Structures are given as C-alpha cells and as structure tokens.
Amino acid sequence: MVPFAGWSMPIQYKDSIMESTLNCRENGSLFDVSHMCGLSLKGKDSVAFLEKLVVADVVGLAPGTGSLTVFTNEKGGAIDDSVITKVTDDHIYLVVNAGCRDKDLAHIEEHMKAFKAKGGDVGWHIYDERSLLALQGPLAGPTLQHLTKEDLSKMYFGEFRIIDINGAKCFLTRTGYTGEDGFEISVPSENAVDLAKAILEKSEGKVRLTGLGARDSLRLEAGLCLYGNDMEQHITPVEAGLTWAIGKRRRAEGGFLGAEVILKQIADGPSIRRVGLFSAGPPARSHSEIQNENGENIGEVTSGGFSPCLKKNIAMGYVKSGLHKPGTKVKIAIRGKTYEGSITKMPFVATKYYKPT
C-alpha cells in the first residue's frame, strides 16, 4: 500500500504487476478508483458554463454520451484531463483526477461564482457519498451483464446510463483508461463492497482485483497521458496530441480559457509534440533526456517502463516538432549512459473499445 493524493492505495494485490497487466488484456481487472472525484453540474446554463472551462464541444454531445476533455488555463496549459458526460441538456457528470481534486474544485468554484453573479443558472454536487469502480477487459461486459437487466450490448464506448446494478442505483459509463473495453461504475459507498464481490464472483475468478502498478502499465501501453507526468499546467492539449478532443465548433469559435494560444498552435503547429518511444537498455523513466543521434538534447521522457504485453521497453515524452516522425532514431540518457531508441506511433498495444460494428 502507498499514500496517493490523501488515500491509501494498493500498488498490487496477490498478482504481480506483470500478471495483472496480462490478465486485464486476456480476461479482466477490477480497480477501486474511489479516490477520483465525481461531480455533477446542474442547471439550464451548465453546458454554457462548462464550455468556458474545457475544450470539448459539450453542446454537440448527445444526451447520454461523453468525451475525454481538458480543463485549460489562460495560457492554454492543462489544469487537468477529465471524462465528461452530458446526462441531459441541464446535467453534466464528470470525473476529475484525485491528485488535482483541490485545485480543480477551486478553479470550477471560482468561475462558477463569477458566472452566477452574471445571472447564470448552474450549481454542483460532489459525490463524496459514492465510490467508483473500474471494470476493464474483454470479460467486463459479459460479467457485468449478470448483475443488471439493462442490455449492455446496446451501450457503446463513451455512453452513460443511470441503472440498477446488483440492487444499487449506479452511474454507469462505458469508458476506462486501459485501452480495453470496460466500465466505470459510480455506486453508493454502502453498496460498493457487495458490488465488487459480486463482479469477482460472476467472473468465476477470471476478473481479478488490480492495483496502481498495472493500471499505470496498461494506460502507458494504450498511449494515454498520466496527469502530472505527461500533461501539466505548461503543456497544451495540442502539444499533448489531444487536438482531436477540441471540437470543430470550438476551433472555429474559441470561448474557452487559453483559446488564443491553442487555436494558434492548431493553425501553425506546436513547438513540441508528445511521442511514443521504444528503447534498449534499462526502461526509460520520467525526466530521462532524449537526444538526437549527434547527442544533442531534443526533449525528455515523461513516462516509461517495461511493457508486459510487448515484452520490451516503452515510453512517452516530448520532442521538438520536426523530430517527432515515427522511425526517427534517438538516444535516451539513463543514469549517465545513452541507449539506442526510436520514435513510434501510439498506442503501443491496439485499443479494443466497444463500438457499433
């Protein structure tokens, strides 16, 4: 167990990180992610309010659907990334990172006060009375289907329902941060342990409790950012390779914090870009220097490790634009020595999100 954002969190359960990562891809994993902060914005102006703070086209989301988005600051940097869902036209449900909870809530509250002072209709509720479980992997759908009457085969990646699961009223989002199909289940805390036990039981032991260690290797294999490593206050969504999350209408109209900086980067290209890396030698870690073949600094690693699925070192980091093309040879400096590496496309492991065929 380790302290994490004010919580005590398991790095691993019985299985090793390697075993847990492979089991998630082959069968399934159950993560307790109750440290993350779920909240709702409600009121007829909640969509207009949220669009001032994030890059997503929230207006364009159909009710019951969601998207990954980024909260930005005045300089276009990322305050946090978040999965947001438009439940109805006057209700948004979102989940923010545990490590960013205090600054995120202060940021939202500050802007909400100003918005309401001008007559805007928006309020919020923070779900401290609920727990959050993430069920991920190919057995996620079949296992959860045993516990609800709702037809999960009709629910696609990014969709949201409020349904009864194992006798409790849950907020169910078909999403996750592993690259696999799966769900995040917001459940009243008094029902959380029973639900976790029921999921493990219905999977006949194939879905296993999984900790932070495998969660990190899974999201790295899927090429997904970890806030605080791969995204920070000085990195824009464009630099982070998340331009796809900025809706077409938002690119035309702006209207979010830092829009001027971000829209200029979309038009002219950013000076640095997030890339995937393969490397020899020991696994690269955060802050390892990336060099060109002449030994000149061109960037730095932000996340790295050994991939249990690919059986080789993978990493992501930022390099100067123009040097970001897949196949570009680089050197990575680790503890005073340099090792051969190359830039590659992400995800490292193909994603398996559940979408209509």
Image (spheres, rainbow, N blue to C red):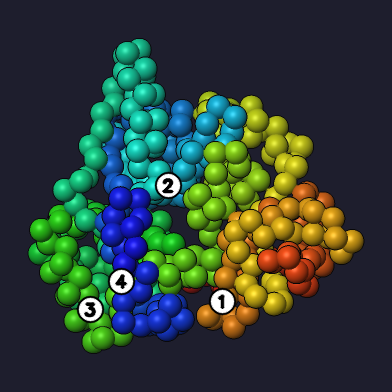
Q: Name the residue under label 3.
A: 200
Q: Is mark 4 on a helix, strand or loop?
A: strand
- Report the side of 332 relative to 52 (left or right): right
- Please tell me how crowded label 3 is: few (under 14), some (14-19), or many (20+) other residues with Cα within 10 Å: some
Tag 4 near tag 3, CB within 8 Å: yes
In space, the residues marked 4 and 3 are separated at their CA atoms by 8 Å
Q: Name the residue under label 2.
A: 82
Is tag 4's residue or tag 3's residue first in the polypeptide sequence? 4
Residue type at numbered disc 3 = Leu
Is any part of residue 6 visible from this angle?
yes
Query: Which dot, 4 or 1, sits closer to the camera?
Result: 1
In space, the residues marked 1 and 2 are separated at their CA atoms by 25 Å
User: Residue 324, which numbered label?
Assistant: none
Pick whichever, 174 or 129, lies toward us: 129
- Report the side of 330 relative to 181 (left or right): right
Is tag 1's residue or tag 2's residue first in the polypeptide sequence? 2
Is tag 4's residue or tag 1's residue first in the polypeptide sequence? 4
* Residue 71 position in % (x across, y down): 47, 38
- Report the side of 253 relative to 133 (left or right): right
Q: What element carries label 2?
A: strand
Q: Name the residue under label 4.
A: 30
Residue type at numbered disc 2 = Ser
